[in-house]
Amino acid sequence: MNTAWFYLVLAGLCEIGWAFGLKYSEGFSKIGVSIVTIVVMILSFVLLSQAMKQLPLGTAYAIWTGIGAAGTAILGMFFLNEPKDLMRILCLLMIIAGVVGLKFFSETN
C-alpha cells in the first residue's frame, strides 16, 4: 500500500472518530470533547488532501466517505445499540464492496 492509500485509510478512520465526537460533544456543549472532535476533523481533512495529491478526486472522496459511513454505522451497532437488522447490514456490505472495488479498480494501485 503506498503512502496515498495509507493517508486515505487514516483519513477515513479519523472521519469515524469525529462522527463519534459529534455525538459525544452534545452539540459542542462539552468543551473537551468538542476540541478533540475539531482536531480529529481537521486531521481527517489534512490526510484526505494529502491522499488526493496522488489519487483521483472521485476515488479518494468516495472511499473516504465510505470508510466513514460504514465504519460509523458498524461501530454504532456495537457501541450505541443501533439497529442490527438484515437490510441495514446488507446495505453496509454494499458500501464496503464499493470501497473495496474502488481500491482494486483504481488506476493508481
Image (tube, rainbow, N blue to C red):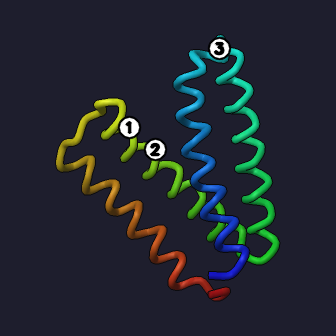
Mark 3 vs mark 2, CA separation in Å: 21 Å
Mark 1 → mark 3, Cα distance in angstroms = 20 Å
Coordinates of residue 108 in the picture (x, y in percent): 67, 86
Q: Where residue 9 appears, x then y in whole percent? A: 60, 63
Horizontally, residue 47 falls left or right of residue 18, namely right
In this view, the residue farthest toward the left is: 86
CB of mark 3 within 8 Å of CB of mark 2?
A: no
> Along the line of sight, which residue is nearer the eye, 95 or 31?
31
Q: Amino acid at mark 2?
A: Thr
Count numbered badges in the picture: 3
Viewport quadrant of the N terminus: bottom right
x 52%, y 85%: residue: 105
Q: Which residue is mark 2?
A: 72
Task: Using residue 81 as the reference point, say whether residue 40 is left or right of it.
Answer: right
Seen in the picture, residue 86 relative to 34 is either above or below; the reply is below
Mark 1 or mark 3, which is nearer to you?
3
**Which residue is identified by label 1?**
76
Secondary structure under tag 1 reads helix
Q: Amino acid at mark 3?
A: Lys
* Circles 1 and 2: CB atoms closer than 8 Å: yes
